[in-house]
Image: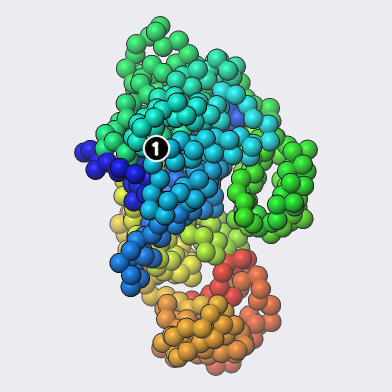
Amino acid sequence: MAQVPQTFFDALAVRTWCGLALETLGRAREEIDAINVYPVADGDTGTNLYLTVESAVAAVEAVFAGHAAGSGPEGPTLADAARAMAHGALIGARGNSGTILAQLLRGMAQVLAEADPAHADGQGLRLALRQAADSARRAVAHPVEGTVLTVASAAADAADGARGDCGTVARAAYDGARAALAATPGQLPVLERAGVVDAGGRGLVAVLGALVETFTGERARGVAGSAYPNPSEGRVNPAADPAPVDGVLDECADSAAAVPGHEGPAFEVIYLLEAEDRAVERLRERLDALGDSLVVVGGDGLWNVHVHVDDAGAAVEAGIEAGRPHRIRITHFGAGDVHTTGAERPPRERAQRAVVAVVPGEGLAGLYTEAGATTVLARPGEPPASGELVQAVRRAHAREVVLLPNDADLRHTAAAAAEQVRTEGIRVALIPTRSAVQGIAALAVHEPDRRFDEDVVSMTSAAGATRYAEVTVAERQSWTMAGICQAGDVLGLIDGDVAVIGSDVAETAETVLDRMLSAGGEMVTLVLGDAVPDAVAGHLEGRVREGYLAVDTVVYRGGRQGALLLIGVE
């Protein structure tokens, strides 16, 4: 169905563009993954671009929701929406391609935020596309032609020559990007050997196609089901074989798998970094000496750092010296993975059943993994997107999957992920666990040899029979079910509601535990955050031994889990 075209680049146009870009990348994701051979043939460029845009969409939607909840009739300004888009992409950027896309969006936002408070016209879009291409190129330590940088520059060049409204400029940029994309195999030998175009460039063409649709109401040529402008443009010699789209994509995937392994660094390291500009300049120099594929994007105190290195610890230590790194992701390009040819990887047989769980800390991730679950780490203030859950389900590689969101706020995200993977033929059961301790209870009774329905019923029953609580610190003054709390107060929440306000962690936790056990219980689970001393656990264990003789206690270390303490009572 054709979209209602946007006349100017305003806040609604930002929202529309982000949504359409996510839809387009969703359709093209697997095709883009299949031809990902540069800089590392790890087959995830399409997925990384999708997750990056998904984070941008979430940030823009949050801005609109915030204005809708306010008392004023006015919605967000163009600056509000553009900055949210850029910030969301920055904090959610995945991989080399996603990091560069985040900088492209940031470059556009820098221009759009300075436009007329209501909207930007065709001239503003031209300037935004130029700033996007130039800032992305500056962010890459050693720019290489034949990549997404080339495609972005071509789009900006084409836009520079266009005169007219936003629709005219967007279409010119899209056409320029398509032409540049088709030429990428002639610029990078690895692409020519594989018979494919650059995967990151293909993704950018898809995003620009969504921009055309935003301002014209019509889907750009070639974007209907593929990031290819047309089926032949993914081949080095398109005139030689007018094969249908499916055949071209299959051959692209086969060719990509046949490319000799990339003899590069062993690890991909990505993290967000809070640091000053001068510290980041020193960081660039140090990381450039450690590895390759270095991309540092962002500004105004917040950066996204991406690099391929052999010494992952040194890359993280460099970030610690520069500022405060967080949301650290380290991926090992291991043997039998991206540094070997695809022909050497025998297909892995699907397991019959698997459990996928969202966990709030590294300690619990280890515990769940030891129990056989595939985990998705949710750091404080950084809940996983539906795309990450979809990827985790695929990574579990099973015919049947039990999904444990372990957070009430992730219910809709998990439901969307489950719906998507069901279309791929995977049977998924979503158990609405609201805390990691409920997930532990469910996992404890999991029996993969049982019938799927029986296993799900048993796990659901165990989770539902587990009351959950957490002890945390109030960030600001607010009204609660237990009264008014001040910033710094220790809060005890039972089943999601504040039940206790105190000043001491151990005393507050003891009060919470007593209230929970007053209704009965046989097992207490304590999960300590990294800021809580072991003495607190010892104090609570002693309290249970003395006051509740028939109740057992088990203690785990959760790591950086947000809450000081998680409590479960079964």
Instruction: Give how far across and how far down residue 226 sits, in percent.
Output: 36, 29
Residue 110: x and y, percent? 53, 47
As helix, strand or loop, the secondary structure at mark 1 comes to helix
Counting the numbered discs, the total is 1
Asked if residue 126 shows in the view, the reply is yes
Query: As rendered, which of 355 and 490 lies closer to the eye?
Result: 490
Asked whether, in this view, residue 262 is left or right of residue 389, the answer is: right
Kind of residue at badge 1: Gly
State the residue at coordinates (51%, 87%).
485
Q: Residue at x 66, y 73 (%)?
A: 531
Q: 428 or 13: nearer the eye?
A: 13
Mark 1 burial class by Cα count in 10 Å: few <14, some 14-19, many 20+: many
Q: Quadrant of the C terminus?
A: bottom left
Q: Is residue 102 above or below residue 244?
A: below
Residue toward you, 80 or 120: 120
Task: Name the residue furthest left.
Answer: 1
> Seen in the image, is 218 located left or right of residue 142?
left
- Residue furthest to the bottom: 547
Position of the N terminus, as image quadrant, is top left
State the image quarter where residue 441 is shown: bottom left
Residue 227, above or below 234: below
Residue at 58 percent of width and 35 percent of height:
134
Residue at 45% in and 26% down? 161
Q: Is residue 90 above or below residue 493?
A: above
Among the 4 quarters of the image, the one containing residue 302: bottom right
Q: Position of residue 63 (x, y in %)?
A: 41, 60
Residue picked out by circle 1: 122
Q: Is residue 328 visible?
A: no
Q: What's the image's color scheme? A: rainbow
| Residue 378 drawn at (x, y percent) | 52, 60
